[in-house]
Image (tube, rainbow, N blue to C red):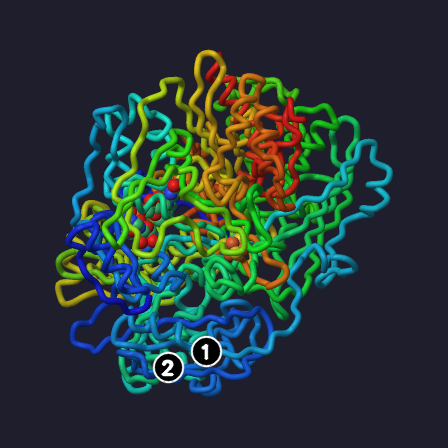
Amino acid sequence: MKFDKPETTNPIDQLKVVGQAVDRVDGPLKVTGTATYAYEWHDPDSRLAYGYPVGSTIAKGRIVSMDLSRARAAPGVVTVVTAEEAGELGKGSRNVATLLGGPDIEHYHQAIAIVVAESFEQARAAASLIQVTYQAADGKFDLAAEREGLGPTGSDDKVGEFETAFANAAVRLDETYTTPDQSHAMMEPHASLASWDGDKLTIWTSNQMIAWSVEDIAKTLKIPPADVRVVSPYIGGGFGSKLFVRSDMILAALGARATGRPVKIALPRPFLMNNTTHRPATIQRIRIGAERGGKITAIAHEGWSGNLPDGEPENAVDQTKLLYAGAHRLTGTRLATLDLPEGNAMRAPGEAPGLMALEIAMDEMAERLGLDPIDFRVINDTQVDPGNPNRPFSHRQLVECLRIGAERFGWSARNARPATVREGRWLKGIGVAAGFRNNLTMKSGARVRLDGRGVVTVETDMTDIGTGSYTIIAQTAAEMMGLPIERVEVRLGDSTFPAAAGSGGQWGANSATAGVYAACVKLRETVAQRLGFNSKDCVFADGEVRSGDRRAPLTQAASNGEVVVEDTIEFGDLRKTHQQSTFAAHFVEVGVDAATAETRVRRMLSVCSAGRILNPKTARSQVIGAMTMGVGGALMEELAVDTRRGFFVNHDLAGYEVPVHADIPHQEVIFLDEVDVMSSPMKAKGVGELGLCGVGAAVANAVYNATGIRVRNYPITLDKLITQLPGAA
Amino acid sequence: MRAFTYERAASPVQAAAAAAANPGAKFIAGGTNLLDLMKLEIETPSHLIDVNGLGLDTIETIPEGGLRIGALVRNTDLAADERVRRDYGVLSRAILAGASGQLRNRATTAGNLLQRTRCPYFYDTAQPCNKRQPGSGCSAIGGFSRQLGIVGTSEACIATNPSDMAVGLRVLDATIETVKPDATTRRIPIAEFHRLPGDTPHIETVLEPGEFITAVTLPSPVGGKHVYRKVRDRASYAFALVSVATVLQQDGTGRVAVGGIAHKPWRVEAAEAELPRGAKAAAERLLAGAKPTHDNAFKMPLVERALGSVLDETRS
Ligand SMILES: Cc1cc2nc3c(=O)[nH]c(=O)nc-3n(C[C@H](O)[C@H](O)[C@H](O)COP(=O)(O)OP(=O)(O)OC[C@H]3O[C@@H](n4cnc5c(N)ncnc54)[C@H](O)[C@@H]3O)c2cc1C
Ligand code: SF4
């Protein structure tokens, strides 16, 4: 099915199942521990062996020699595979560093071997017996030091004459903000079980993008994609770190190939920080010029980040092209070459760090203009793409988000003069920020089966990374086929199923359900035909197909065997004529300890406008999780770089702090009633990442309101406040 | 983790003798620190002596005054004990400010006292660390040292003792009771129990090889208001950047011990004499001779302000 015209009425609009706060269909499996996660696959009939990775202990240089003899002789060891043993490997098109390094070393904890043994403990013990001699080379590890003189990546995006307009603006802001390297820190580590059957490889793993993985595994191992099967039905969090093939898959496959046995491996926690990907640090310069009344005339956002050679920049500037009006504009990224581990997508890449900077700048600018920060944003709202005024937003309710949120949060009680509200030992402040995330859509396929029991089974390689995909897909099929949700079975995360959108960039929910919609439209047509109906005017309800006076049970269509159809939704050119984005307003109240400068969040509200909400319960879970990530980014998350040795030092969950329950207060989420006919037949958009975009700045602005101290370098830890607190020496 | 042999101790003195006879041996109590370190091969004992079967898990009232806390009393039980909560509130609060409920259920009094530093370089066996590998150098000096020590540090090591409980015990003047392999016993004041790093940061206490902790005693209650203030980046489940344990009397006198700043719970009697004059005067004495790094210089004002806040709160 091609989606290239604004959607009209369709069966989803009934909203009997879709749009309802249905409980997670996979909930019982998860709370009873019976959902099988990657490391838990176990075939009792196979002689499973356990792998353990060895990581480089230098950041850059060469392996001169490796002594594997003690490891090979250790109890239980079956084999050790290094790059030398593995033979020539290709490289996937989505990973920058080589997943099995050697002799060249590109980053700290780059995998250089897998030890395979009869037990996990034996593999781990033997791994530490490998002696490696390195020749270390000098590397570059300090973004700030590499920043000077870097030109634009590609070319800057320019509208009008920014420099002139900025120079002539009545009120100006020119500030620089930084965000640190961050780690996904999801609960489930990367893990894989690989098994070869002749030339055919199956990998049970934890991955967000099944079809991408098949391609990149095939490329890396130099085998045909048709020989690779990837299975990943349950995923204990990914946050972008499982978008791509990582070392666990390749090491498991190589270990299994070398031993002729299934091999299972999980990356140890420290590998998460230095072996896999992370969100790269950014330095962001923002300039805003405005008229005295608050109208923005010039806006520029430049972002510096670093990555390994051939890596991409962190695109922290894109939202600035679209979020606010202004005739003269400049945005661009600059990329330094660094020898730190690979930087890549993490939790709303681009917009999350970009808004952390932009939305502080907006708060600062409002203050310079003597405007309320909400009014300032409203003044600069735009209903069209500011770079191309002929291109309207498909739907944009940022102003409504801000206004409704202000009302609900009690914004009018805010004292605009900072550091004036005290409650016991706490300095109290509230802050606001706009949230923005583009709505991406991806081609997505599904197969649906109707059987004689009247059960519809959906098969797609879509993944559920804890987000609720199982549930909203079941809702979609139930709505389309006129069945209660219990009559729908959903099977996900297997490359033998049709390729779907996968989970990333908040494109999953809308695109994957649209794919299921397309397949169900086909199933309805086939069923109607088999039952002798004119498919156009059929109603599917209560397990029946009805048209005029005639009705027939759905099961009748499958009386001579299953009905199986497959379709794929493809997205046309609507985005060329209409900009599709999602919007939010985030409100935060903090208390800052007047003595110690510890910041604790006291209240949070997010108002989201993101198309049709397919399931308010799972969507709310997404948004409150995202808001929690926003608190983490604002107040504590930072990979500490040792710029002498070139690695992230705090490489475990004790050193890399993310919020715990005690950090998160009451969170309220409001979804505006909205349908977007330009986005898909579901009229939905992405919402998960929107819940994060802007939250960090709302926290930062609240800290400013509480203390009068403007921190432009995240995370806002107490050391950045303590010497400037009221009463500090 | 390296392979090890295992035995269950029959008595404290037998445990001590067994440990002395086998230089690769370690006692294991709750295991919440030791096992983590073994998995990373930071600790590599070749033999474990499990002391969990020895009893030593009761808290007794000492007839002359005070409490005797068995070495294997779990942190949860110690913090919840009625007598501790009534008379030694700072200890209860310090324990509850640490780790998590699950860990405190396992963690023992002796094990907590002997938990090792959380210096991140200590945790990466690929990095030089004098504490882990004597003579290899200290990566934290000149590296990432935000969490690390500001007083009593040395050229060899700037690590901190991470225990909250130990700070509470220090301010209460606890005593550690031990038995040696030759069955002699001794009582070590907590002030003397932990060592400064000097040029042997790998030697953290005055315990001799094989010496086994049997109990910790608390002297008679001293009254006063008991406060434990732990300052950290997140609200729970994090080690202290700085912690302040105080026992303050109505007349303005009192005691203060500070955690998160040194290789041992930090208490300076001369600073306590300044308490009636306020936090600034006391902190100046407490931190005399401090050598903070660029990363952890914030701990200097933080100690003073946290103490000031505790004094204000207690006195108001
Ligand atoms: C995730 C995490 C968070 C934590 N957070 C905090 C925190 O915020 N604050 C805090 O204070 N602590 C914290 N801890 C540390 C925790 O308090 C310690 O791990 C615990 O107290 C150790 O006690 P244990 O009985 O398990 O010791 P074990 O691990 O069994 O032993 C520790 C050491 O003591 C020795 N030992 C044990 N018993 C004796 C004895 N009777 N005589 C002589 N030697 C003995 C052992 O040989 C070993 O060297 C945390 C730990 C973890 C894992
Ligand atoms: S501070 Fe101490 S523990 Fe940390 S690296 Fe230096 S020697 Fe090791």
Between the C-alphas of marks 2 and 1, the distance is 9 Å
Looking at the rendered structure, the kind of residue marked 1 is Gln
Q: Secondary structure at mark 2?
A: helix
Answer with left or right where residue A96 lies relative to residue A251: right
Question: In percent of the image, x 32 and y 83: which residue is there?
Answer: A73
Where in the figure is residue A402, as x and y percent of width and height? 56, 30
Where in the figure is residue B13, as x and y percent of width and height? 21, 51
Q: Is residue B66 above or below residue A8?
A: above
Answer with left or right where residue B127 lies relative to residue A487: right
Q: To which residue does mark 1 refer?
A: A131
What is the quadrant of residue A267 in the picture? bottom left
Looking at the rendered structure, the kind of residue marked 2 is Arg
Q: To which residue does mark 2 refer?
A: A70
Foreground residue among B212 and A65: B212
Quadrant assignment for the N terminus of chain A: bottom left
Q: Secondary structure at mark 1?
A: strand
Number of labels in the image equals 2
Q: Chain of mark 2?
A: A
**Does label 1 point to a residue whose CB lies under 8 Å from ligand 2?**
no
Question: In percent of the image, x 34 and y 70: which residue is there?
Answer: A124
Quadrant assignment for the C terminus of chain A: top right
Question: In percent of the image, x 29 and y 34: which residue is there?
Answer: B217
Mark 1 surroundings: few (<14), some (14-19) or many (≥20) residues within 10 A: some
Question: In percent of the image, x 26 and y 67: which residue is there?
Answer: B4
Mark 2 surroundings: few (<14), some (14-19) or many (≥20) residues within 10 A: some
- Badge 2 or badge 1: first in the primary sequence: 2
Q: Is residue A280 above or below residue B270?
A: below
Answer with left or right where residue B175 lies relative to residue A684: left
Foreground residue among B282 and A409: B282
Mark 2 and mark 1 residues within 8 Å of each other at the beta carbon: yes
Where in the figure is residue A303, as x and y percent of width and height? 68, 52
Where in the figure is residue A690, as x and y percent of width and height? 50, 44
